[in-house]
Amino acid sequence: MQRDLVEQRGWIAETDYKEGLALAQLCPGPLAAQLAMYLGYIRYRILGATLVGLAFVWPSFLMVVALGWLYTLYGGLTWMQAVFYGVGASVIGIIAHSAYKLTTKTIGRDWLLRAIYLVTAAVTIITQTEQVLLFIGAGILVWLVKAPPTGFWKRWGNRKTKVLSLSPVPLAALLAVGGATGGTLWTLFTFFVVAGAFVFGSGLAIIPFLYGGVVQGHHWLTDRQFVDAVAVAMITPGPVVITSGFIGFLVAGFAGAFVAALGTFLPCYAFVVIAAPAFRKYGKRPAIAAFVKGVTAAAIGAITGAVIILGRRTITDIPTVLLALGTLALLWRWKKIPEPLIVLGAAIIGLVVYSVLHH
């Protein structure tokens, strides 16, 4: 986006691009999708954000729906099981590498962020689910320590800012109640809306949240199916969170895929459209930046915990151990190697090895 839209075509100013990147870091949702929507908003307001959002999501959505159909149709066949035998182990390596990069880049030497990271990772491993309130608490803690709200309550009483009024907590509570009383499609939709409203930064941050709800909470998928869903997102172009479409398809067919994908991307679209004007005015405030740092540290800790949880269920023998370690070694040695290429190689290896082991 930066190369094509800013440098080559000159459609977007450098300052607008940087503001969009900052807003995408601040708001929940997949970063790349939010940035794309913001750039569309800069050019043509709501129409631009809407069209860019559809163009960004639609191709990968159709791909995961097609793969979901093939998965449900042929999932019981040996070749499909063999492919995901290798791909699942490789995906664990990819997530582990991403968690490492995010940790070193974001956490650094900050003692408070390190503490939040370790606590969140431990809680995720012990409870085998992700705690949304822990994310919010981490953000508030860093805000209070790094940017103490001197005079905050006075300003709040006189004039509430638009950014602070965008808190997703009331939204989450409302949708949670609705999800508890509705049918499967409504429950799918509300679950993925809440997921989309609480995931900051990298698309991989949604994985522990989805695991806690899809596998542990609602029991829509098994551990094996969940890892396969993440693998499908890895082998298709587009945002990683498009795995929601695959999950939705396995639960309730095409309608499930549609409402799950809609629920995932609707919050980030709403945040962009609603927050874009206010962000230009309030986005650089230290308190907001500190809150985002705390939430991000907690999210990375949850990703690290999810790697361990999913790894224990996916890496079950020597070949899967070697595939996961091989993926890590490739990504460590050649940082620019495309992840779909690694996953494709793992699929071929898995097809051969699984056939030999189960002959």
Image (cartoon, grey):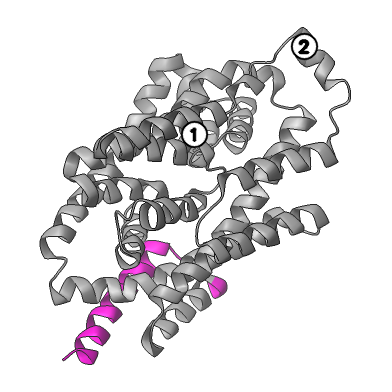
Quarter of the image that includes the C terminus: bottom left
Query: Where, by quadrant of the figure, is residue 55 drawn?
Result: top left
Q: Residue 238 appears at what percent x and percent y?
A: 37, 47
Q: Residue 204 appears at what percent x and percent y?
A: 49, 53
**Residue at x 27%, y 86% (from the top left corner):** 353
- The residue closer to the viewer here, 38 or 100, is 100
Left/right of residue 221 with respect to residue 338 in the rendered view: left
Q: Which residue is mark 1?
A: 34
Task: Please name the amino acid that badge 1 sits on.
Answer: Gln
The numbered dot on residue 347 is none
**Residue at x 35%, y 55% (from the top left corner):** 233
Could you tell me if residue 168 is visible in this image? no
CA neighbours of label 2 inside 10 A, class few (<14), some (14 to 19), many (20+):
few
Query: Where, by quadrant of the figure, is residue 75 drawn?
Result: bottom left
- The residue closer to the viewer here, 39 or 107, is 107
Residue 129 belongs to magenta span: no
> Which SS class for mark 2?
helix
Could you tell me if residue 44 is visible in this image? yes
- The residue closer to the viewer here, 111 or 350, is 111
**Residue at x 61%, y 55% (from the top left corner):** 300
Q: Is residue 320 above or below residue 37?
A: below
Residue 350 belongs to magenta span: yes
Residue lying at the far front in this picture: please name it.
181
Badge 2 or badge 1: first in the primary sequence: 1
**Residue at x 80%, y 53% (from the top left corner):** 112
Query: Where, by quadrant of the figure, is residue 177 drawn?
Result: top left
Q: Disc 2 or disc 1, which is closer to the eye? A: 2
Q: Residue 23 appears at what percent x and percent y?
A: 60, 31
Q: Which residue is mark 2?
A: 157
> Which SS class for mark 1?
helix
Span colored in magenta: 332-359
